[in-house]
Image (cartoon, helix red, strand yellow):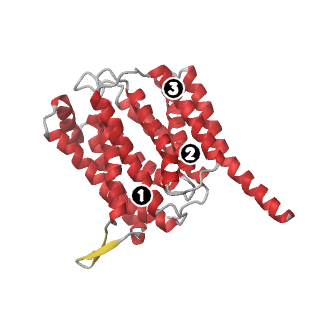
Amino acid sequence: MRLTRSIELVVLFYFLSYVPNIIVTKLVTSVPHPAFGRPLTGLETLPSTLIISLVLTYLFIWLSGWHRDSNATLIAGKRIPIPTRYTALSGCGTALILFTVPLSFTFEGVSIPYIQLLMRGDILVIAPLVDLMFGRRVRWWSWVALVMVLVSLGFVIGVRGELGLPPLAIATIIIYTVGYFVRLAVMTRVSKSGDPASIRKYFVEEKIIALPLAVVALGALSFSGLGSQAGQLEFGFLKVWSDPVMLQLIFLGVSLTVISVFAAIILLDARENTYCVPMERSASLLAGICAAFVLAAGWGLPSPTTPEIIGATILVSAIVLLSVAPRLDKRNRAAGAASA
């Protein structure tokens, strides 16, 4: 599979993949399930989605040939991909991300959009910190785009969420942020070179660790007997496979796999994290706004608020800035060199 050189095109594919994923996720978790008389929760839908994504990701790794670029060992004459110590560490960080997202859906008195936006905002803060740690130059347009995305998040958070958070919710945000910090640090350390083979290698080695670990972590929570969470996960692991909702969950598993490929290509781009992370985060948040408009028009769900629309406009401006400014800078430098 050939990796495109245009990050803007990858971001467009990422956005187009994310919109239907959000729409189906929202419908599955908003429309009452016949057996329960209420919508399914994230803990009831995520286990099967992750398992499907795991299987599809492994198939993609094999059928695409990406496994040929990974570190590997021979077992019974077969070349089996294995991670290095760095990509194994990144896989653990990604597993923390995949595990804390469903946990964040379970806190009483805390709106899901609020805590999710807090989690996304933290990543925007750590992106330049990782760049500075590794001595990577952060260009002015990356700083400006970072501020623009933070302002956009401020508009949305200001109208949606409560101020108070229980201790477990705070711990969840911290664990999620640690997972992303580890992932970005490892990416910057070993793979942000612009080499397509390096991207393929990293993706394979990270995912063969992250997805199984995330499924095991959810399974451990299920068997722990921890209140209603365990009962929801029991349905998500065991009973959902014969439920009609599996058609939607299969779609979510497929789209999650596609999204993960595009996200890895964006974040592993050779440019600084302060450039790549706002680009990826802007696209995902903009996908959420567009999905909300579709859900409002087609299913009567609440429309985006005025602050959310303003925030979306700022996000579009940030993406345009990140796309145009580097090209203008390159053109100006080329013109200056020609004049000299």
Q: Position of residue 200 (x, y in %)?
A: 45, 64
For image coordinates 33% across by 57% down, the residue present is: 89
- Residue in the foreground of this view, choosing between 56 and 278: 278
Number of the front mark, 1 or 3: 1
Disc 3 packing (10 Å; few <14; some 14–19; many ≥20):
many
Q: Amino acid at mark 2?
A: Met
- Residue in the foreground of this view, choosing between 57 and 34: 57
Disc 2 marks which residue? 279
Disc 2 packing (10 Å; few <14; some 14–19; many ≥20):
many
Q: Amino acid at mark 1?
A: Val
Q: Is residue 258 visible?
A: yes
- Dot 1 and dot 3 residues touching (CB under 8 Å): no
Disc 3 marks which residue? 156
The span from disc 1 to disc 3 (Cα, nearest Å) is 31 Å
For image coordinates 34% across by 66% down, the residue present is: 84
- Dot 1 and dot 2 residues touching (CB under 8 Å): no
Q: Residue 203 vs residue 304: left or right?
A: left
Q: Amino acid at mark 3?
A: Val
The span from disc 3 to disc 2 (Cα, nearest Å) is 18 Å
